[in-house]
Image (cartoon, grey):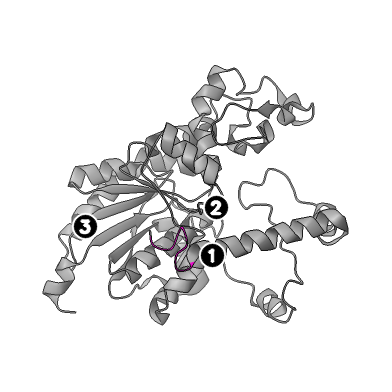
């Protein structure tokens, strides 16, 4: 493609929150946009850029024609640790320190020879400085909420939960006295939920804890954007999606599950070679999995950096047995297969996520 044609391409700048569970879905979305004709700039933090090099080599950050990788500082002290950074400190730093460097990057991209001018910014739902940065250079911005729509709705009610005296908790007894089983019946689109079903960052006795207000405020900031993208599909969270659209924000788009959508629509070998993993893969485990029969392995997911206790072998064994034995396990496996089928249908031709 010659220079004149390149300059005419829409140019989207994508900036994820700098942890693996946010980087991966943003990369999936970026690859989809690239497959639809966008020039893409994917923005990692300098810390994660170094982690990518350690895990995948320098070729992992070299980019491709029409798909480049850039960096901004996260504002934390320099570190070469090959581990996820402290989440509260990182959240506090990104909201205080990333706006300036991000605006500078956008301006530099606009003055880069042979590159189309920036026409849109897609920023993570907890990186709302992207809204202000896009306004400063005069382009539209879209928020991308990488978690569920239910989590978003929960965080939108952060202020109401405080107003009602529910959060913060008075003492640590809430962990064991049954408080977390208290029904919550007033959040639109979320029937039959309990306090324990709301996002865990809200469970604190310290009103000054960084995460207590960070997620709630960032969810509110999403409403300042022209549109919000969710990594979910209509059939999975229909009630809460309709409640968000009717009570808070009508311009929402579902594009998930993104890993399925990306695998079915992004077929170019080169772009699929860009791997966003910040961790060195255990090839022996992958080889072992490849030798197993279909549907013979149970994956127990405790989350990642947000797990709030040491996971014991006995817990894992109990969960596996619950999944694999008895009527309850049979029902759980059946429901998992049903939702897998619905997720695949949502990302295929005619599905709710396919044509967005």
Answer left or right for 47 relative to 112. right
User: As rendered, which of 257 and 108 lies closer to the eye?
Assistant: 257
Residue 58 at x, y percent in the picture: 41, 74
**Of callouts 1 and 3, the N-terminal one:** 3
Within 10 Å of the Cα at label 2, are there few (<14), some (14-19), or many (20+) other Cα atoms?
some
Q: Is residue 228 above or below residue 342?
A: above
Q: Position of residue 115 (x, y in %)?
A: 19, 67
Q: Determine whether 64 is above or below 306 in the image.
A: below
First to last magenta residue range: 348-355
* Residue 244 visible from this viewpoint: yes
Q: Tell me whether circle 1 and circle 2 mark residues in contact (CB < 8 Å).
A: yes
Above or below: residue 138 compared with residue 282: above
- In the rendered structure, the answer to whether residue 273 lies left or right of residue 295 reads left
Q: What residue sits 60% from the left and 17% below the top?
A: 165
Number of residues whose C-alpha sits closer than 10 Å to that of mark 1, classed few (under 14), some (14–19) or many (20 or more): some
Q: Position of residue 130 (x, y in %)?
A: 32, 45
Task: Work out whether mark 1 precedes mark 2 in sequence or the reverse, and give the earlier one.
Answer: 2
Checking the image for residue 345, the label placed there is 1
Q: Residue extending furthest front?
A: 350
Q: Are marks 3 and 2 in contact (CB under 8 Å)?
A: no
Report which residue position mark 3 lands on: 118
The reply to whether discs 1 and 3 touch (Cβ–Cβ < 8 Å) is: no
Q: Which is more toward the observer, 101 or 184?
A: 184
The secondary structure that most of the magenta stretch takes on is: loop
Tag 2 residue: 235
Check disc 3 and report its element: helix, strand or loop.
loop
The question of residue 255 being in magenta is answered with no
Give me the C-alpha separation between circle 3 and circle 2: 34 Å
Question: Of callouts 3 and 2, which one flags the residue occurring earlier in the amino acid sequence?
Answer: 3
Q: Is residue 95 left or right of residue 343?
A: left
């Amino acid at each position: 493609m010659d220079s004149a044609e390149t300059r005419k391409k829409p140019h989207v700048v994508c900036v994820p929150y700098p942890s693996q569970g946010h980087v991966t879905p943003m990369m999936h979305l970026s690859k989809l946009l690239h497959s639809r004709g966008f020039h893409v700039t994917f923005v990692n933090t300098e810390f994660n850029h170094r982690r990518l090099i350690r895990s995948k080599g320098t070729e992992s950050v070299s980019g491709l024609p029409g798909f480049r990788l850039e960096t901004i500082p996260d504002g934390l002290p320099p570190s070469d640790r090959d581990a996820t950074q402290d989440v509260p400190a990182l959240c506090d730093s990104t909201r205080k320190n990333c706006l300036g460097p991000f605006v500078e990057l956008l301006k530099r991209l606009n003055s880069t020879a042979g590159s189309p001018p920036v026409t849109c910014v897609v920023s993570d739902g907890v990186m709302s400085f992207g809204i202000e940065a896009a306004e400063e250079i005069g382009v539209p911005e879209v928020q991308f909420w990488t978690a569920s729509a239910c989590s978003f709705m929960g965080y939108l009610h952060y202020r109401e939960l405080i107003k009602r005296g529910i959060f913060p908790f008075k003492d640590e007894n809430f962990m064991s006295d049954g408080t977390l089983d208290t029904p919550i019946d007033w959040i639109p689109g979320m029937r039959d939920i309990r306090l324990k079903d709301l996002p865990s960052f809200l469970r604190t006795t310290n009103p000054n804890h960084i995460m207590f207000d960070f997620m709630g405020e960032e969810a509110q900031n999403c409403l300042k954007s022209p549109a919000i993208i969710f990594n979910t599909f209509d059939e999975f969270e229909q009630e809460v999606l309709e409640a968000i659209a009717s009570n808070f924000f009508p311009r929402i788009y579902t594009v998930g599950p993104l890993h399925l959508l990306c695998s079915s629509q992004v077929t170019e070998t080169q772009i699929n070679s860009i791997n966003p993993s910040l961790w060195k893969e255990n090839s022996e485990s992958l080889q072992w999995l490849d030798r197993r029969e279909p549907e013979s392995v149970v994956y127990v997911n405790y989350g990642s950096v947000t797990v709030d206790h040491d996971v014991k072998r006995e817990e894992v064994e109990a969960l596996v047995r619950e999944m694999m034995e008895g009527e309850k396990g049979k029902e759980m496996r059946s429901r998992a297969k049903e939702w897998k089928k619905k997720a695949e249908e949502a990302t295929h031709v005619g599905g709710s996520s396919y044509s967005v």
